[in-house]
Image (cartoon, rainbow, N blue to C red):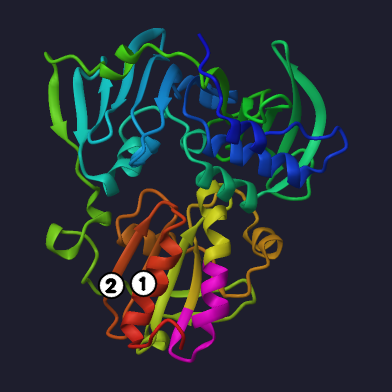
């Protein structure tokens, strides 16, 4: 039996007129996600083109509910699914009870777990196939995505029997380069289907079909009755259990990471042809953003880095630099121009990233005037911008208003 939606929710989701604009559709959708009490959705991840031969296909059903205290994923979450590769199939699962996150793989016969809240996003990203879609649990994350990509309305569609607007998210002005599409129900303004497609032209060999990683999400029950027992499910007890650990490059100096270490020497050229060396920047506070054109979280982080440059980066004792790495045939200059970045972006910084042990991006590094690394930020979080600015102000000995 469906749970009755509150009067406040009904007011917030009053039907939009047919001619309402894109901004109203997106804002109403974000508000609906923020007020969603519980629900379920299906996820399928697959590769196309030549990379399909070595990338597993995964599928899962996810159940979630909102907790008053919030927390990672907003509240208890369970995902059960399967991974398919090389003609074989095995079970995969994710369990979060509001305190501990567990990830289970039948193929590895082990459970990786952690109760450290700040470790969970990276653990989920690195410990198995992507089963949970963060932005469906968190209106703040969805809002951040909608603000970091260009959006437009596509043709209306039906998902099952539900009439939907189609919102198209583009990375640039090329209509063929679509980041993802979303069908948003006109009735309750919640997403009904989302299709992400990440192009991967530099991977694999020749193929008639383009190399891409495709994720498709379809909502099931929304604010509907979900068996409470599903949230009590846990991984099998008769398998190995391992506490998840941060990769070495994300740890503090005491844990063997890069914090406290000397930043590597380099001599690199920016897009304007100017040469930058580590030695020429000594005595200044550095903020370095490691990124690539194919990395969506990197693109999402860029506005925050630009804002930092426009603020503290105008000082003589602070330098903000982009460090372009791990390119696969992309056009860094086009991305810098599209994003309106005014700080220098150094090209071919792979050796610096490798010296620091980076195997994933984005990575944003704060280096002190003594040449030593003060902070490292792996992945992208909206909280990072505030933390980076705080770290820089701490090094400079200045307050928020200065």
Is 312 within the magenta? yes
Q: Position of residue 242 (x, y in %)?
A: 14, 31
Give the residue furthest to the front: 7
In the rendered image, which residue does mark 1 sit on? 366
* Residues at circles 1 and 2 in contact by the CB criterion of under 8 Å: yes
> What number is the disc on residue 374?
2
**Position in image of residue 329 (x %, y %):** 61, 49
Q: Residue 233 placed where, x, y %? A: 26, 16
Q: Counting other residues with Cα less than 10 Å from the Cα at mark 1, is it few (<14), some (14-19), or many (20 or more)?
A: many
Q: Where 321 sits versus 354, above or below?
A: below
Q: Residue at x 23, y 20 (%)?
A: 108
Q: Which residues are magenta?
A: 305-319
Residue 203 visible = no
60 in relation to 166, above or below: above
- Residue at 32 percent across and 81 percent down: it is 394
Name the disc covering residue 381, or none. Answer: none
Q: Determine if the magenta segment contains residue 172.
A: no
């Amino acid at each position: 039996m469906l749970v009755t939606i509150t009067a406040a929710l009904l007011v917030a989701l009053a039907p939009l007129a047919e001619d309402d604009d894109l901004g109203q559709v997106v804002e109403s959708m974000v508000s609906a996600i923020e007020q969603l009490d519980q629900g379920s959705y299906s996820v399928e991840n697959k590769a196309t083109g030549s990379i399909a031969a070595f990338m597993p296909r995964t599928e899962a059903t996810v159940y979630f509910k909102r907790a008053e205290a919030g927390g990672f994923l907003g509240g208890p979450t369970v995902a059960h699914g399967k991974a398919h590769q090389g003609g074989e199939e095995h079970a995969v699962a994710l369990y979060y009870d509001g305190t501990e996150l567990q990830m289970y793989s039948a193929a590895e016969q082990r459970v990786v777990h952690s109760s450290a809240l700040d470790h969970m996003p990276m653990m989920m990203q690195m410990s198995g196939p992507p089963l949970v879609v963060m932005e469906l649990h968190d209106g703040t994350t969805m809002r951040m995505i909608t603000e970091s990509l260009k959006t437009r309305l596509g043709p209306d569609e039906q998902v099952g029997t539900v009439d939907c607007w189609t919102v198209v998210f583009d990375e640039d002005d090329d209509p063929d380069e679509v980041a993802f599409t979303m069908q948003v129900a006109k009735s309750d303004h919640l997403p009904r289907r989302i299709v992400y497609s990440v192009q991967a032209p530099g991977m694999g060999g020749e193929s008639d079909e383009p190399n891409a990683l495709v994720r498709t999400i379809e909502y099931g029950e929304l604010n509907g009755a979900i068996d409470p027992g599903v949230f009590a499910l846990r991984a099998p007890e008769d398998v190995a259990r391992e506490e998840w650990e941060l990769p070495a490059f994300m740890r503090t100096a005491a844990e063997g990471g890069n914090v406290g270490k000397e930043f590597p020497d380099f001599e690199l050229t920016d897009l304007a042809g100017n040469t930058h060396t580590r030695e020429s920047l000594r005595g200044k506070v550095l903020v370095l953003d490691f990124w690539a054109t194919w990395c969506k979280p990197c693109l999402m982080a860029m506005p925050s880095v630009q804002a930092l440059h426009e603020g503290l980066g105008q000082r003589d004792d602070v330098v903000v630099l982009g460090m372009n790495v791990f390119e696969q045939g992309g056009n860094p200059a086009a991305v810098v121009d599209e994003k309106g970045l005014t700080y220098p972006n150094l090209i071919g910084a792979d050796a610096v990233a490798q010296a620091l042990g980076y195997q994933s991006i984005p990575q944003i590094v704060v280096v002190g005037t003594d040449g030593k690394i003060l902070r490292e930020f792996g992945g992208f979080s909206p909280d990072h911008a505030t933390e980076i600015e705080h770290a820089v102000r701490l090094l400079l000995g200045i307050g928020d208003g200065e």
